[in-house]
Amino acid sequence: MEDNLEEYGRAAVDKEIEEYLATKELNLTATTDGASAYKDAEYIIIATPTNYDPDKNYFDTSSIEKVIELVLETNPNAVMIIKSTIPVGYTKAIKEKYHTDNIIFSPAAIGEGLFITPRSVSGAARKLVNDGYLYKEGKAPVSYGITQAGCQVLSERESN
């Protein structure tokens, strides 16, 4: 199913994006058919939900893996860029699982504009702050630092 992107609008307002969309000749299409979207792509950005379960200390990365599997079936030479929140060591493990080097991680950053909302960061960050792995600095923009306990956990996970 393909539709005109303008029918759906954009999820966020960003000055540079607005200017680019207004001044460039574009041929954009929205689709729910992953295979047709991936077949000729050089780069695929994966930005799917990875809900964190604090009781299980677990990120649900199944949505990322569904995309990776479809990309590998459709266009195994495409470079997949994960923008979703993922656990430490996930990129290395997923490359090994799927026997590909075409997966990279590019973490979302508050500085990327209005696409990152407090809700998209707050759940996992709040849990990590409450558990003593991160500390919060500032109010606007908020930044986080890693505590000694956080460094120790990262070190242990990376060595596994």
Image (tube, grey):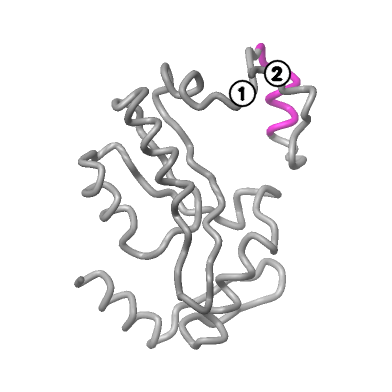
From the top left corner, tell me how far across and down residue 43 is, in percent. Answer: 42, 29
Q: Within the magenta stretch, is there residue 151?
A: no
> Which residues are the magenta region?
17-25
Q: Quadrant of the C terminus?
A: bottom left
SS of the residue under disc 2 = strand
What residue sits 38% from the left and 38% below the top?
68
From the top left corner, tell me how far across and down residue 6 is, in percent. Answer: 77, 22
From the top left corner, tell me how far across and down residue 63 is, in percent. Answer: 48, 47
- Asked if 2 appears above or below 155 in the picture, the reply is above
Q: Earlier in the sequence, mark 2 or mark 1?
A: 2
Are the residues tagged 2 and 1 within 8 Å (C-beta)? yes
Q: Residues within 10 Å of mark 2 (few under 14, many from 20)?
A: few
Q: Is residue 85 left or right of residue 143?
A: left
From the top left corner, tell me how far across and down residue 28 is, in percent. Answer: 64, 18
Whole-angstrom CA distance, mark 2 to mark 1, is: 7 Å
Disc 2 residue type (three-letter)? Asp
Disc 1 residue type (three-letter)? Thr
Instruction: Choose between 146 and 101: the one closer to the eye.
Output: 101
SS of the residue under disc 1 = strand
- Asked if 26 appears above or below 76 in the picture, the reply is above
Residue 3: image tag: 2
Q: Main secondary structure of the magenta part?
A: helix
Residue 31: image tag: 1
